[in-house]
Amino acid sequence: MLFDKFDAMSRAREELAEAGVSPFGAVAEEIHSATEGVVQGKPVILAGTNNYLGITFDPRCVDSAREAVARWGTGTTGSRLANGTFAEHVALERELADFFGVARAIVFTTGYAATQGTCATLAGPGDVILIDADCHASIYAGARLSGADIIRFKHNDAADLEKRLRRLGERTADTLIVTEGIFSMRGDIAPLAEIAELKRRYGGYLLVDEAHSLGVLGDNGRGASEAAGVEPDVDFLVGTFSKSLGATGGYCVSPHPVLDDIRFSIRAYIFTASPVPAVVASVRAALGILRSEPALRRRLWDNARRLHQGLADLGFEVGPEASPVVAVPMDDPRRALTHWQALLDAGIYVNLVVPPASPGDHSMLRCSVSAAHTEEQIERIIAAFAALPGD
Ligand SMILES: Cc1ncc(COP(=O)(O)O)c(C=O)c1O
């Protein structure tokens, strides 16, 4: 039967419902600010939002969106290739190209479309995509769609990447190496200096998904590639507007003039409606804030270090380095579930991540920190973790 494959999901959901927890699709009944809302009827501190700069309620973004909806209407009702290219889209592409210091940028309707569409289009049958094992589902989806040979290298392991590049021989000329900046799940950072050096030595092309590092890393907030000093080595930078820029949408920028032709070959760009102008206007305002207010980045990192240290002091295995994504691994998925609920009962909303979405076999409680969190809120998050029942 067509539906048999959903039996396991159905059973898992029933078990969760019987246990009285509903972690997937938890509804935010109210959102009061970047860091506060109401979930399951309880006022909570939002500690799992990817709202890194905390600007979702910034009046400059809200007012830009409001003015744009009045000026352009609620939607474009068409794809960029048909009737869906408005002056707002073109202006944002110009501003992104200027920000990243390249000639070309493409704006997509979602970050997923940006990564999936770019990977699916850049490589094709006969080519190779070398992917960090922990890369996001959208990258895997694009790689599969491309028809290229997919080879995974061990997460953040440049030596393993080198082994695979060496084995490829002349095929490296047709190879796309794909990694992320800050990784979405564990919050660790790709060794981009080493990866860029390998690309220079062996050939191929490098694509970096900066979804979680835009606005977070680099002196100018351009991401992990800027922080590692390898921007000239990166052939394609992709990312999303749904995290530090507080909206939705995605981008791809590149120094290669061929990006103009690639744009018209990406099905996830051609065959979908373009981003809503109000969203684009708020992203433009958010990009302006990202560029002009480095203090937000400093506050984000102060909060990230505070939470990381607090959880490490409690004995949680939070990884060696502070990061705005603070993942607490849990060996037992049931324990992850009860802890997730206990945190929520204590007024702290974090993300519950279970396989296959999590890397390896781990479940995890994934926190993400915002520049908008106050010290007191970070301390309350740490206190809620401290109060979790032991074994
Ligand atoms: C690394 C990475 N790439 C791409 C995406 C997709 O972005 P969006 O959710 O904005 O479509 C995400 C979102 O979670 C992500 O974490």
Image (spheres, rainbow, N blue to C red):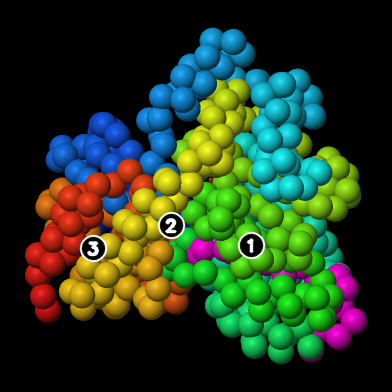
Amino acid type, label 2: Phe
Q: Which residue is drawn at 48% across and 46% down?
A: 294
**Image vertical order of residue 269 relative to residue 180, above or below:** above
Question: In terms of image quadrants, where is residue 218?
Answer: bottom right
Numbered mark located on residue 6 in the image: 2
Q: Which of marks 3 and 1 is in front?
A: 1
Amino acid type, label 3: Leu
Q: Determine which residue is flagged by label 1.
A: 225
Structural crowding at the residue carrying mark 1, measured as other residues with C-alpha within 10 Å and reported as few (<14), some (14–19) or many (≥20): many
Within the magenta stretch, is there residue 174?
yes
Per the image, label 1 sits on a secondary structure element best described as: helix
Per the image, label 2 sits on a secondary structure element best described as: helix
Along the line of sight, which residue is nearer the eye, 2 or 34?
34
Numbered mark located on residue 337 in the image: 3
Q: Residue at x 58, y 51 (%)?
A: 220
Distance of mark 2 from mark 1, alpha carbons?
Answer: 40 Å
